[in-house]
Image: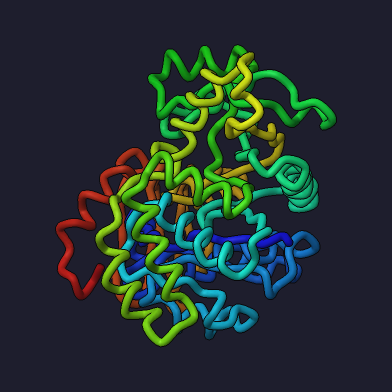
Amino acid sequence: MRYAMIMAGGTGTRLWPMSRASMPKQLVPFIEAEQDGGARRSLLQVAAGRLDGIVPEDKRYICTNESYRAQIRETMPAFSDAQILGEPVGRDTVNAVGFAAAVLQKLDKNAVFAVLTADQLIRPEAKFRELMDLAYKLVENDPTRLVTFSIKPTYPATGFGYVERGGRIPGFDERATFVERFVEKPSLEKAQAYVESGAFGWNSGMFVWKASTIMDCLRRYKPESYDGLMKIAGAWGTSDQQKVLNEVYPTLPKISVDYAIMEPASREQKRAAGTPSEKSAVKVCTIEADIDWLDVGSWPSYGETLEPDTDGNRVSGDAQLLRGRKNIVVNDEAGHTLALVGCENMIVVHTKEATLIMPASKAQDLKQLHEQLPDEVR
């Protein structure tokens, strides 16, 4: 059976003040989505809607911080309490994945699930669904496959990981290949070479695999996580469920799924190639995704979701600009007008609680500023 899990545990500090501890970026309704005629929706709502026609609503799960449960239930009533996997604390992506795998394996020993994130905008959605269907078919055909999606790069980004594609997977179209290797956030020179080679894609952080295969990978590559997650699975559905989760989950080693599973699995695959052990080795695969993929993790990237005017200004909400160029202006307060005169390459974000003003070139410094803010305005 096909399932999906959306990871939605981040805080979005580089989108402050719209994204706050009490309302993280994945829950803020500031995206004009393809669904519902462009009505404003949250990144999490958009991510869930992307699964329409691929995964039934009752087979969709969200892994998030437990403190966000009430807000998700209010804005996304299709998700029952049982479909929200609430982490007592964040322990990075491998444990979010393992948490979902442990629960789904207990519910359905044949569960195949997709791992998606609530950070990206993906268009066109019809093409995404086609690629997702291909990924599910790859795993349903061979449950030892771990499938990731590599985004066809449009520029030599240094902030993303890269996936090098290997040989084609027999019986499937040319988009499906084995993985040669993973490379984490290369230098600009290397990134340029990767893009020019045509053999690399951006690591999207999206996957499809069988729950039992992932649990076996954890047992072999990260036994500390495996042992803890098995304790959680053992108590799941009993009166001790929350008690065991609260006791065990904070003790799990904090590490990403790429470092904990994908990299050692790809090394194992390379060693096994051409030997009798190949039949039992985990097979790390990728699907090249020629789609528009935007990681909405900062104000400059959010600006790309807004249509520019003739001067390159991107505006959301009530604002007036005079002789301004290439500004990002976001106003979340009704009845309040933002006015900019002679500004260029600025970011101005206003909410009822706080106002941010900074040059676009300093967007990466926002995380540092966030650390200095009093708790009550974070």
Q: Nearer the viewer, residue 158 or 252?
A: 252
Q: Residue at (47%, 71%) from the top-left corner?
A: 85
Q: Residue at (31%, 43%) from the top-left corner?
A: 364
300 on left or right of 254: right
Q: Quadrant of residue 338?
A: bottom left
> Is the residue 240 above or below the residue 49 in the image?
below
> Is the residue 299 above or below the residue 47 in the image?
above
Residue 137: image location, x then y, percent: 78, 45
> Is the residue 132 above or below the residue 189 in the image?
below
Task: Specify the farthest residue to the front.
Answer: 276
Q: Is residue 329 visible?
A: yes
> Is the residue 34 above or below the residue 302 in the image?
below
Q: Residue at (45%, 83%) from the top-left corner?
A: 238
Residue 96: image location, x then y, percent: 44, 58
- Give the quadrant of the C terminus: bottom left
162 on left or right of 351: right
